Every structure is written in structure tokens, then in C-alpha cells.
Image (cartoon, rainbow, N blue to C red):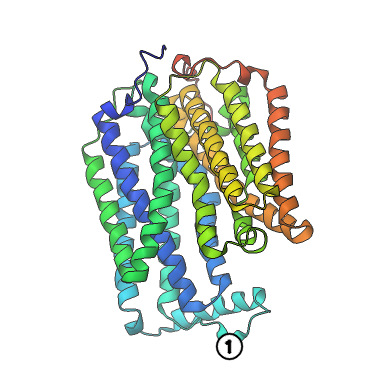
């Protein structure tokens, strides 16, 4: 494709995709704001860091339990309906949380709720031995209900995840898929900046319930907008009724480019994550306090948005696989620079560049995987990808935190950056075909094979 023929708005010219993009963007803003408000509310109720950790637990448990079955579901049922129904139920639950939050003082202290709070308190005491037990408050009967709502919503998001991740290819022609993924990625990054900021402001000037109402309105808007979305005609073949949910793993294993791309992203996330270290850098190294921490957290997202806008207006690269490898190496180099920086502005630049490089590699990887995967397998392959990324984010935080405790934050961040570069070089050597991947618009989806139960 020549520069003259390149259309940076190709995907946006398709009404179905445009409706999905706008609705998904609004829903993500509502959810990001919701997450900030819910975490802050639970912390205010309990004064417990463990209570915040349990919020992460209720979000990650459904990922391991449900993501592979969700992928199989996405390959058997209309993905649009899965997204609509799970979003609608989640919206109703957010509305329930509005009532629980507003009337929390009037909730009767049922025995079951008292026992649940007692269990939560016992868990907190196991981990917070340094804290005065008298400062921990697990006496609000609304607390267990809130955790239950968050858990069910997490289950719904996991069930919808593979459908959302594999839905875009059915809304645009293959030639516009990379462009569509670029726009989807950029709007997601924008929502991760706007949503938390909006949630924090609303909580500061009004109350938690207002944030949850915002999530209700955003979710309902997404459902309404999806009602007008009609996928393009495809040759999708429904998965055989007895096809195993591990078919996505089998496909990845026999496709070296898909396996290499996913492995590259997995290890880059595990080694290159520095988000958990940013509070330490803001406090002990850069001395910029919480305000500076906010800028540090926003810098990668800003870089991702900038790169997304740049790539949207550029023609498809002749060797996208090779550039993906270089971008992951650049991501590692940017984090290495950040690790040794003691200047605030240089740290911001390094994190901004890390977001730029990360965004390009994500767009290429996601487009590559979606184009090479038969539509009847996209749900299950997307599920495996989400399992990889979801678990690697948690492992990344653990790696960074433990290394920082043992060797200090500079070594923890620096080893992660250098390790990312080393892994990139290893995968480039082990999967030479990835370096030869042609322009994305020239890729052909692998033909469906007769699947067998695994």
C-alpha cells in the first residue's frame, strides 16, 4: 500500500465499527472511574491495605477460572450478544451498588454479613501485623455486599473479554483491521487517563454513588449503541459442538509467528513492568510527591496515544514483525533509562517513550494474531492471550516489588529493562520468520482445520 493510498480513517468509515468504538470508549471511561471510586471507598471504610489487595484478588480469580471457557463461548455464540448481555447485567449491578452505597448505614447486620466481615478482618490481621488492629474497621455490612458485586462484575468482564477482543475483525474489512486496532488501542489508552481522573474528581466534589451512576449511564449507552451494530458478512464457521476449549492453545503452538508474538509480549510485560515501583521513585528518588506520581502514571498512556495517532496516519510497514521486535527492544531501553534517571523530566520522557514503543508492539501483535487466526478460533486464541497478559501483569508487579525489596528499585527497574532487551534478541533469533512477516494488509488468515476435542 502506498503512502498516497493510505487512509488513516479507514476503520472509522464503517458505521458498525464507529458505533462500537464510541460505545466501548464510554464504557471504559465509566469502568475506569468506577474502579478508582470502589477502591477508594473500600479503603475509607476499612483503613486497610489488605482490603485493597482483596479487590485485586476478586478481579484476578475469575480470569484464571473463566477465561478459557469464555473463549470457547465466543466461538459458539454471537459475540455481539455476549457483549451486550454481560454489559447489561454489569450495569444493573452498578445500579445496585448505587443503592448499597447510598443506604449502607441502613443495611441490617445479618449474621452472614457479620461473619463475612469477621473473615475479612482475620485476613487483614494476617498481613497487617505492623498496623494497630484498632485502626482496622471491618464493621460495615455493605462491605461484603460490595465485594460480591465486584466479584460478579469481574466474572462478567472475563466472560465478555474474548468476545470483545475478537469482535473488531468482523466490523471492518481485513485491509482496515490494523487501522481499527490502532484506533481501539488509542481510545482505550485515553480512557485510562480520563476515567481515573474523572472518577477522582467526582468523588472529591460529590460522592461515590455519582461515579457508579456514571458507570451505569456509560454501560447502558454501550448496550444501546451495540443494538445498531451489524457485523460484516464473513465466512465464519461455528465451532464443532465438542471442540475443546484448549483449541486456541493448540493453534498457537503450531503457528510460530503467533506463538512468538505472544511470548514476546508476555515476557516484556513480566520483565518490563515498573508501575509498582513508581510510588517509590516519586517519593525516594525523584522527590516529587503524589502530584508527580500522577504525572509518572500518566506518561506511558500519553506516549501510547501519541504513537497511536502517528501510526494511524502512516502506511503499513513493510516488515511489521521486525519493527515490533525493535519496538519491544526500545521499550526495554526506555525502562533502562528510567531506572537510572534522577531527574523528573528525564523520567517522564523515558516513560513517555516506553508507552510509544509498547503501543506499536501491541497494535502489531494484536493485528498479527487476529489476521492469522481463523474466525472460528478467534475467541479461544484471544482468551489465551488475555490469560497470558492478565497473569503476567500480576507476576510483573510481584517481580518488581520483590526485587525492589531485595536489591532496591533502581536494580529492579534496570534488570527488567535489560531483561526485556535480552528476551527480544532471543525471540528474534528463535523465530526468524517473525522478522519476515509481510505488510499486515497482505497477511492471509490460516484456513480452518477440522478440529478435534482436546
Quick check: can you spot residue 32?
no
Quarter of the rendering containing residue 332: top right
Residue that mark 1 sits on:
134
| Residue found 64% across the figure and 76% down from its top | 128
Q: Is residue 397 above or below residue 301?
A: below
In the rendered structure, the answer to whether residue 272 lies left or right of residue 83 reads right
| Residue found 34% across the figure and 73% down from its top | 101
In the rendered structure, the answer to whether residue 311 lies left or right of residue 57 reads left
Foreground pick, 428 / 74: 428
| Residue found 43% across the figure and 22% down from its top | 314
Q: Is residue 68 above or below residue 293?
A: above
Residue 14 rendering spot, x and y as whole percentages: 26, 27
Q: How many labels does the image show?
A: 1
Foreground pick, 43 / 6: 6
Quarter of the rendering containing residue 145: bottom left
Residue 213 rendering spot, x and y as whole percentages: 28, 63
User: Could you classify mark 1 by the number of other residues whose Cα lies within 10 Å: few (under 14), some (14-19), or many (20 or more)?
Assistant: few
Quick check: can you spot residue 204?
yes
Q: Is mark 1 on a helix, strand or loop?
A: helix
Foreground pick, 351 / 288: 288
In the rendered structure, the answer to whether residue 233 lies left or right of residue 392 reads left
Residue 218 rendering spot, x and y as whole percentages: 28, 53
Q: Is residue 164 above or below residue 403?
A: above
Amino acid at each position: 500500500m502506498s503512502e498516497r493510498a493510505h487512509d488513516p480513517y479507514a476503520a472509522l468509515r464503517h458505521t458498525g465499527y464507529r458505533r462500537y468504538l464510541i460505545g466501548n470508549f464510554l464504557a471504559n471511561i465509566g469502568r475506569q472511574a468506577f474502579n478508582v471510586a470502589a477502591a477508594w471507598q473500600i479503603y475509607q471504610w476499612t483503613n486497610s491495605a489488605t482490603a485493597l489487595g482483596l479487590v485485586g484478588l476478586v478481579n484476578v480469580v475469575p480470569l484464571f477460572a473463566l477465561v478459557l471457557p469464555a473463549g470457547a463461548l465466543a466461538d459458539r455464540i454471537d459475540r455481539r450478544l455476549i457483549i451486550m448481555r454481560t454489559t447489561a447485567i454489569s450495569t444493573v449491578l452498578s445500579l445496585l451498588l448505587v443503592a448499597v452505597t447510598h443506604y449502607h448505614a441502613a443495611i441490617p447486620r445479618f449474621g452472614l454479613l457479620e461473619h463475612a466481615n469477621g473473615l475479612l478482618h482475620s485476613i487483614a490481621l494476617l498481613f497487617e501485623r505492623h498496623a494497630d488492629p484498632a485502626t482496622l474497621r471491618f464493621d460495615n455490612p455493605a462491605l461484603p455486599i460490595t465485594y460480591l458485586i465486584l466479584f460478579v462484575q469481574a466474572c462478567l468482564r472475563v466472560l465478555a473479554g474474548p468476545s470483545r477482543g475478537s469482535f473488531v475483525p468482523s466490523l471492518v474489512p481485513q485491509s482496515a483491521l490494523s487501522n481499527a486496532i490502532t484506533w481501539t488501542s488509542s481510545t482505550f489508552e485515553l480512557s485510562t487517563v480520563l476515567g481515573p481522573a474523572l472518577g477522582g474528581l467526582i468523588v472529591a466534589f460529590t460522592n461515590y454513588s455519582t461515579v457508579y451512576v456514571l458507570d451505569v449511564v456509560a454501560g447502558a449507552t454501550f448496550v444501546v449503541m451495540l443494538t445498531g451494530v451489524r457485523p460484516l458478512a464473513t465466512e465464519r464457521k461455528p465451532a464443532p459442538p465438542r471442540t475443546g476449549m484448549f483449541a486456541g492453545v493448540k493453534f498457537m503452538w503450531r503457528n510460530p509467528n503467533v506463538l512468538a508474538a505472544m511470548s514476546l509480549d508476555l515476557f516484556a510485560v513480566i520483565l518490563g513492568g515498573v508501575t509498582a515501583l513508581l510510588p517509590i521513585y516519586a517519593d525516594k528518588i525523584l522527590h516529587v510527591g503524589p502530584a508527580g506520581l500522577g504525572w509518572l502514571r500518566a506518561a506511558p498512556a500519553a506516549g501510547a496515544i501519541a504513537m497511536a495517532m502517528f501510526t494511524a496516519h502512516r502506511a503499513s510497514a513493510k516488515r511489521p514483525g521486525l519493527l515490533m521486535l525493535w519496538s519491544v527492544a526500545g521499550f526495554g531501553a526506555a525502562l533502562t533509562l528510567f531506572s537510572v534517571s534522577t531527574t523528573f523530566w528525564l523520567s517522564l520522557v523515558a516513560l513517555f517513550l516506553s508507552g510509544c514503543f509498547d503501543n506499536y508492539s501491541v497494535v502489531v501483535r494484536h493485528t498479527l494474531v487476529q489476521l492469522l487466526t481463523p474466525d472460528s478460533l478467534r475467541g479461544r486464541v484471544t482468551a489465551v492471550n488475555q490469560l497470558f497478559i492478565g497473569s503476567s501483569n500480576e507476576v510483573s508487579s510481584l517481580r518488581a516489588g520483590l526485587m525492589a525489596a531485595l536489591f532496591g528499585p533502581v536494580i529492579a527497574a534496570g534488570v527488567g529493562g535489560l531483561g526485556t532487551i535480552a528476551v527480544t534478541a532471543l525471540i528474534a533469533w528463535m523465530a526468524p520468520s517473525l522478522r519476515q512477516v509481510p505488510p499486515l494488509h497482505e497477511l492471509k488468515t490460516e484456513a480452518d482445520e477440522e478440529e478435534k476435542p482436546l
